Image: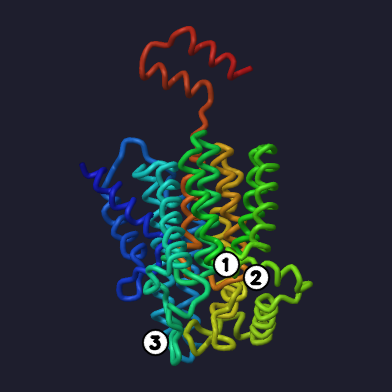
Amino acid sequence: MYRTFLRGLAAICLLYTFWPIFRFHGLTIFDCLSPLTVLCALPYRPKDRGAPLGSFILATAGVAGLAFAGIVSVIRSFDSYEHITEVALLIVALGGTVAFVYVLENRRILSAVEALTLLCASSVVCAIVVTLQGKYHMLLSLIPTEPGEGAIRPEAWTRFTGLAEHPIETGIVSAYGVVIALGLGMYTRKWLLPLIAIGLDVYSDQYSASLTAIFALTAAVGLMCIYNRAYKALVICGVIIGIGGLWVVFSSNFGLLGSRLAAFSQSHGDYSTLRSREEQWAATLDMIEPATLLVGNGFSTMDLPLNRPIHDTLIAAVYHFGLLGLASQILLLAFFMVRLRHHAPTALRSILLGVIIIFTFSYLTGPGLSRRSLWAPPLLLGAYLTTRKQATTSPLQAAAGQLNSGPLNSDSLNLGAKGRL
């Protein structure tokens, strides 16, 4: 009964992963439910435990290092109160996610397939809402307005957000859903529901119109097929992407996305969005001084260069928190990236590969320090694909253990002899 309660609580939490528009006093529902799930799951003691806490040392060290960097960098912030508040929210978001994925795997609350299916369902619901907003102009009140005077009304948006907070985030959520559904289809060999999920996620991209997500998804799907040696699927995906690309560019039904793709293809590397980000990166790097490397520049609104979030998370980590902030990010990234070398089914590792590719595109081109929807999938897969270390025993120790536990038969002797050979 208690395990059923934990499974239900964890399932609700995972469903809210890609719905950050729902908040309670500045915290997303995922932020609120993940610590609650951790507290409720800690007393639970299943017979078969998963990876121990020591396997999460990189992630926990990364969160701890970021917390310490946030404390140190307050001395350089122009608004210490907002700095402390924002750092606290950041630590709650990342620390809560790490603790949540740890108890999910260690306490065996949900299987890897169940957890990934819930993430896929969360993405599909977001895609459905985006489609309702863009195609039928429904649920426009869910679109967040820009703060400050002259805030943009939902009716004035030409790109839609669904249950996320920005069109780029919506596109990344859709891309995550596609690679997770594709990997689950490869793993389970059941394709009906994954194909429906892929279709809904891809169809919604015309309304979020995120070029970052489109390019990331294309690269992720291609490398996933190569990783799984699914060359036939790779050819099919290539044909579909080619036909879809032509349709998007020349079809009036895909107006905004088509126009953005056409503008990008004709820009010859001088696309306006890319140019503005490059200008921001250059301005931010110019503001990084020796003191910045030591303690950072603070994490409040008044500390932002050019009065807007930095669209490169590594640069942002250095700018806001110094080299200690950069080191904490490297530890967090290493936690799930090294899982590609762990022993796990190829299809599941290919999902991690696709997720890492999409994560990297968004991480290096957007403000990803505290975006829950960006961090949750790779951290979750990092937890479930962790290989538990098995204790190695010599043949004599194994034989001694069998003598203590029961009669030694000829089969066990033969295994011992083979071991010595």
Confirm whether residue 147 shows in the render. yes
Q: Mark 3 or mark 1, which has the lower sequence index? A: 3
Q: CA distance from mark 3 to mark 1?
A: 36 Å
Tell me the kind of residue under disc 2.
Arg
Q: Nearer the viewer, residue 110 or 331?
A: 110
x and y, in percent, of residue 184 in the image: 50, 41
- Element marked by disc 3: helix
Q: Which circle marks residue 209 in the picture? A: 1
Classify residue 277 as left or right of residue 151.
Answer: right
Q: Mark 2 or mark 1, which has the lower sequence index? A: 1
x and y, in percent, of residue 381 in the image: 50, 49
Q: Residue at x 68, y 86 (%)?
A: 286
Q: Residue at x 52, y 39 (%)?
A: 185
What's the colour scheme? rainbow
Classify residue 300 as left or right of residue 8.
Answer: right
- How dense is the environment of label 2, judged by Cα within 10 Å: few (below 14), some, or many (20 and up)? some
Q: Quadrant of residue 287?
A: bottom right
Of badges 3 and 1, the one in the foreground is 1
Q: Look at mark 2 in the image and give the residue it sits on.
A: 260
Q: Look at mark 3 in the image and give the residue it sits on.
A: 81
Q: Nearer the viewer, residue 343 or 350?
A: 350
x and y, in percent, of residue 128 in the image: 43, 58
Q: Residue furthest left?
A: 1
- How dense is the environment of label 1, judged by Cα within 10 Å: few (below 14), some, or many (20 and up)? many
- Element marked by disc 2: helix
- Element marked by disc 1: loop
Q: Are marks 2 and 1 in contact (CB under 8 Å)?
A: yes
Q: Mark 2 or mark 3, which has the lower sequence index? A: 3
Tell me the kind of residue under disc 1.
Ala
